[in-house]
Image: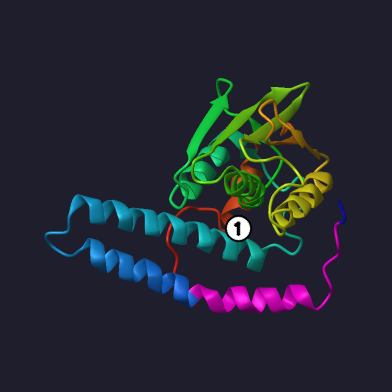
Amino acid sequence: MQVTSVTSGFVPSLQEICHDMRQPVASVFALAAAVLAEPGLSQAACTRMDEIIKQAEWLADLIQHALHTTVPGAPGSCRSDLLSVANEAVAAECVTWVGEVKLVASAGPVYTAVHPVLLRRMVANLLSNAMRAAGPSGRVTLQVGQEEGSARLCVEDTGPGFGKIQKGLGLGLAAVLRDAIRHGGRLECGNGTGGGARVSLTLPIASTHSPADDAYAEFCGYSGHAWAAE
């Protein structure tokens, strides 16, 4: 699997685009808040608006991370709970996917030394690929746990298996592989017991939590709250 490098002129351009995206995202928050304040809004409409706000918050986190991180997802930046991030990714992906998702996890959190925004991007890429491969009537299974001193996420689908899906679905795998290697982890791809694809992401377990972790996470914008554009 080949990973190409990013050209020197691309990152400043991306940061400029992210900066310009802040105002539209802030507008989404404002409009959603205005709708929720309307009297007589049905419970179903409130639930949908809450989902819109969650998606906008995730987009805001992505933008903040791109703007304030010189090298996105630099190793050792902070730590994240892989189980919590997997649950968030599943909830977001299920908004637009009607298939069956099963999350199997060991008791308690599984911390790894990856920034939460980058970790969710990695998990979302694997999950999105699996859901597309499985199709709307398929099933995707996630397993989260620790194995031999490492945090491990396995994603298996009921699709046709590697090499038997439409072109373009492997782009996210290249990005996940690159970031896994950068953090001292690995990505293994193969076929599951049912014939579908099985992808395993292994990352180092995080060291003891420190106040610097919270400071870094706040600096990079992973707060889960609305913010105003400058």
Residue shown at 78% from the left, 45% from the top: 180
Q: Is residue 10 magenta?
A: yes
Q: Describe residue 162's horizontal placement relative to residue 8 as left or right.
A: left
Q: Nearer the viewer, residue 42 or 205?
A: 42
Displayed quadrant of residue 139? top right
Q: Describe residue 63's horizontal placement relative to residue 170 as left or right.
A: left
Viewer can see residue 229: no
Place of residue 23 in the rendered image (x, y in percent of width and height, measured from the top left): 47, 77
Residue 16, placed above or below residue 75: below
Residue shown at 60% from the left, 73% from the top: 18
Q: Describe residue 81's horizontal placement relative to residue 150 as left or right.
A: left
Residue shown at 71% from the left, 79% from the top: 13
Viewer can see residue 36: yes
Q: Tell me the chief SS of the magenta region.
A: helix
The residue that mark 1 highlights is 219
Residue 31, placed above or below residue 169: below
Q: Is residue 146 magenta?
A: no
Place of residue 197 in the rendered image (x, y in percent of width and height, measured from the top left): 70, 37
Q: How many marks?
A: 1
- Label 1 packing within 10 angstroms: few (<14), some (14-19), many (20+): some
Place of residue 47 in the rendered image (x, y in percent of width and height, measured from the top left): 29, 51
SS at circle 1: helix
Place of residue 225 in the rendered image (x, y in percent of width and height, measured from the top left): 44, 56
Q: Which residues are magenta?
A: 3-22
Q: Amino acid at mark 1?
A: Phe
Q: Describe residue 171's horizontal placement relative to residue 136 as left or right.
A: right
Colouring mode (rainbow / by chain / secondary structure / one colour): rainbow
Q: Nearer the viewer, residue 179 or 227?
A: 179
Residue furthest left in the image? 40
